[in-house]
Amino acid sequence: MLTVKKISKAFGPTRALIDVDMEIRRGEIRGLIGENGSGKSTLASIIAGAQFADSGSFELKGKPYAPRNMVGAQNHGVSMIIQEMGTIPGITVAANIFTGRLEEFTRFGFINMKAINRRAAELLQEIGAGDIHPETLINRLNFEERKIVEIARAMVANPDLLIVDETTTALAQRGRELLYRLIRRLHEENKSVLFISHDLHELMSICDTITVLRDGIVIDTLEKEEISVDRMRSLMVGRELSGSYFRSDYDGSYSDEVVLEAKRVTSGILEEFNLELHKGEILGVGGLSDCGMHELGRVLFGIDKPITGSVTLKKNNVQVKDPHVATKNNMAYVSKERDREAIILNASIKENVVLPSHRQLRKVLGLITRRSETNLTNKQIETLRIKCRNGKQICNELSGGNKQKVVFAKWLGKESDILILDCPTRGIDVGVKAAMYKLMTELKAQGKSIVMISEELPELIGMSDRILLLKNGRLQAELRRSPDISEKQIIQYII
Ligand SMILES: Nc1ncnc2c1ncn2[C@@H]1O[C@H](COP(=O)(O)OP(=O)(O)OP(=O)(O)O)[C@@H](O)[C@H]1O
Ligand SMILES: [Mg+2]
């Protein structure tokens, strides 16, 4: 289907891709893996016409292929679902699906909205998302639904090669299944898929072959029978990673002291929800994406005001009315939607990292020294292995996973006592995931408290002292840390 010949790409001094060669066959589902910043998105976006290579060339279906933009690529049969949020706010679902293709529905200067809506409805139906209405304003949809709209957009031109850049981490179970079905369908139609993910188990179950990138270089391509989680891990990081990276202790102990309490909170889908977070506790919160767990995170940090009920900091009996109160009381929040809520993309890593830490950095005289800012930033870049030129680099230029690390760094630097983490390891590669889990364990040992909202069951089981499972805005079960908890058991409660 596609031959990639000696593709190279540099951003200033950063060499993102170096002489990449690759061949994807018809009907093949190819995985593409590598650590954060290894060049996966760059390669994908060049194939999909969103960026240009400095050198090298492509052949598609045996003919030279050099897309000038994404619509051009689509017309040749190549579509991509991009890693970051790719919908355009302020317009409808249908208009999003047909961005760049409106002229197909235009006659004598008039856009035939009816036809667009009809076609969009058909398309959504086809991919199994018939419940999303084409005329809805995109802003009304949640994170997952918007990602599904992007999937629909990628399917508009009936692609021969579909590129999926870390889409599943933005999707919960329903969306994932929708995407897996689509991928299987393409495979059956003898079309090809390039699938990027950090979830090695998912890759194993979906892909026929897997290509490994490290620092912009193709390290190897594994055939089906060579694929194993350990093999992928060691090829990606260039060394053996051994053992499990979750907590190894199972006593699940924490102090009796309650630090944060939510009482009869009603907000969004949440109904009369109660929660107690203890000092030194990692409290896992799990469920399907629309179970209310993301709302819970927002309410706990004061972003959303509950209709009834309250969230209280126990040490001083202060109500968390808004994020300002929260940050003043050493609370931190990592949002699932990092580009919208968690990071300032046009600012540097340093500016983002020091933003919430100003009080800590302020010296006796009330001055923040440049040096202490730089030291803090460098410390975080090192601990989390943020791949960048230096702390002055603008966050927009970082790879997806490295942006997520900046979000984490921002709140760690502040030395927060209570951390509300909503899908904290989304899009993070295996090596750094291990580092983040270790950090969380250390924070716990220091007596800090963490609410970890997660869609990843192994992470919930592996890290939590207690797990709250939600369904339709209500508590379904509370599980205590134990080596006996299984994913199957959890799924029973949340579906
Ligand atoms: N516009 C840009 N300006 C400067 N550097 C860039 C730009 N886009 C990407 N890079 C750099 O190129 C390298 C590869 O980035 P890329 O986004 O392809 O990584 P990735 O493998 O997709 O990582 P992730 O798993 O985190 O998504 C990184 O070092 C990144 O900082
Ligand atoms: Mg990427």
Image (tube, rainbow, N blue to C red):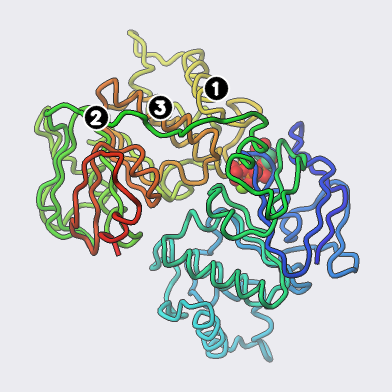
The furthest residue to the top = 364
State the SS at label 3.
Answer: helix
Q: Are marks 1 and 2 in contact (CB under 8 Å)?
A: no
Residue 36 in view in this figure: no
Distance CA(mark 1)–CA(mark 2): 31 Å
The image quarter containing residue 234 is: top right
Q: Tell which circle, 3 or 1, labels the residue nearer the N-terminal end.
A: 1
Q: Residue 235 appears at what percent x and percent y?
A: 67, 37
Question: Which of the two marks, 3 or 1, is nearer to us in this view?
Answer: 3
The image quarter containing residue 270 is: bottom left
User: On the image, numbered disc 3 is attached to which residue?
Assistant: 439
Answer with the quadrant where ligand 1 appears in the image.
Answer: top right
Which amino acid type is shown beneath numbered disc 2?
Asp
Distance CA(mark 2)–CA(mark 3): 18 Å
- Label 1 neighbour load within 10 Å: few <14, some 14-19, many 20+: few
Q: Residue 86 appears at what percent x and percent y?
A: 56, 60
Question: Which of the two marks, 1 or 2, is nearer to us in this view?
Answer: 2
Q: Which mark is residue 382?
A: 1
State the SS at label 2.
Answer: loop
User: On the image, numbered disc 2 is attached to which residue?
Assistant: 251
